[in-house]
Amino acid sequence: MEPIIRFENVHFTYPEEEQESLRGIDLSITEGSFVAVLGHNGSGKSTLAKHMNAILVPTEGRVLVRGMDSSDEEHLLDIRRTVGMVFQNPDNQIVANVVEDDVAFAPENLGIPSRQIRERVDAALRQVGMFELRMHAPHLLSGGQKQRVAIAGILAMEPKVLVLDEPTAMLDPHGREEVIQTVTRLCREKGMTVVLITHHMEECIGADRLIVMSNGSIVADGSPAQVFSQVELMEREGLDVPETTRVLHELGLPTDVMDPETCAERIAAKLRGSSAASEYPMNGR
């Protein structure tokens, strides 16, 4: 099956800079998957995200969205209908004084009939758990609620892909949890393709796939368990790993699991083995 987004040897350099921000990226994203992109500031992860809906276009190489080349201006509107973007600060995306009016803003600009807009707005607000607050003023909401309204505004455009560029960077822990639960549910229950850009390790654990970026390149790509098991690499990049992974690594045990129960079973098995070895140091002789 054709990937919904594909990067082919993508290079990108900002006009005011000499150093490349993306260095030969090859990447395919499968429809319906939840992909997390992790990296420190300046790693290129936000630049990568902005190529997914043609906010930026490659200096060299190409990005294809459902087969459409992002550098072809004729495809620009269709690409942005396919890939919706949510940014760090929800206040920058809120444009109306009532929640439901804010969510209706984008589909109105697309010229969608009023009846369809009503249906889309209600459906989008229900999907993010904000329908009961549809008549509230956005500026009175919490940070997590504002970000969910921003997500609803994108969902009302009915995109196939939701790209979130560090959407929890300005939120407290509760707000971060709200947003991550919302986008995870959209992927798992609605089949939406989700690309989450973050520098928070714990936000990546529930993803299908984890990509680590450094200096404009992909340095790790696999399931979260596979990537986090590369403890030395993560440490070199200044990134955390789950505590379960770290404990297993320090004990010299396989680190390909992250759930506490399996971690505890492996530690217990090692302790049982150590106990048996000390009790019978000469194999029972």
Image (spheres, rainbow, N blue to C red):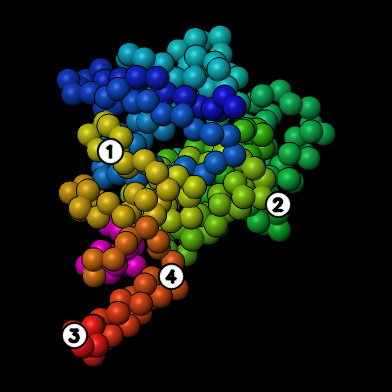
Residue beneath the point at 37% across and 31% down: 48
Q: Nearer the viewer, mark 1 or mark 4?
A: 4
Q: Earlier in the sequence, mark 2 or mark 4?
A: 2
Residue located beneath label 1 in the image: 219
Image position, residue 108 (x, y; %): 69, 29
The disc, 3 or 2, on the residue closer to the chain's N-terminal end is 2
Q: Which amino acid does label 2 sit on?
A: Arg
Q: Position of residue 162 (x, y in %)?
A: 54, 38
Can the viewer see residue 272? yes
Q: What stretch is highlighted in magenta?
A: 239-250
Mark 1 or mark 4: name the one nearer the start of the chain: 1
State the residue at coordinates (48%, 50%).
207
Taking depth in this image into account, of 59 and 105 the one nearest to the observer is 59
**Whole-number angstrom distance, CA of label 1 to CA of label 4:** 27 Å
Q: Which of marks 1 and 2 is nearer the N terminus?
A: 2
Q: How far apart are marks 3 and 1 (CA)?
A: 44 Å
First in sequence: mark 3 vs mark 4: 4
Q: Residues within 10 Å of mark 1 (few under 14, many from 20)?
A: some
The tag earlier along the polypeptide, 3 or 1, is 1
Magenta-span inclusion, residue 192: no
Q: What residue type is labelled 4?
A: Thr
Residue furthest to the right in view is 115
> For the residue labelled by badge 4, is the local secondary structure a helix, a strand or a loop?
helix
The residue pinned by badge 3 equals 281
Q: Name the residue under label 4.
A: 262
Q: Can residue 97 be seen in this view?
A: no
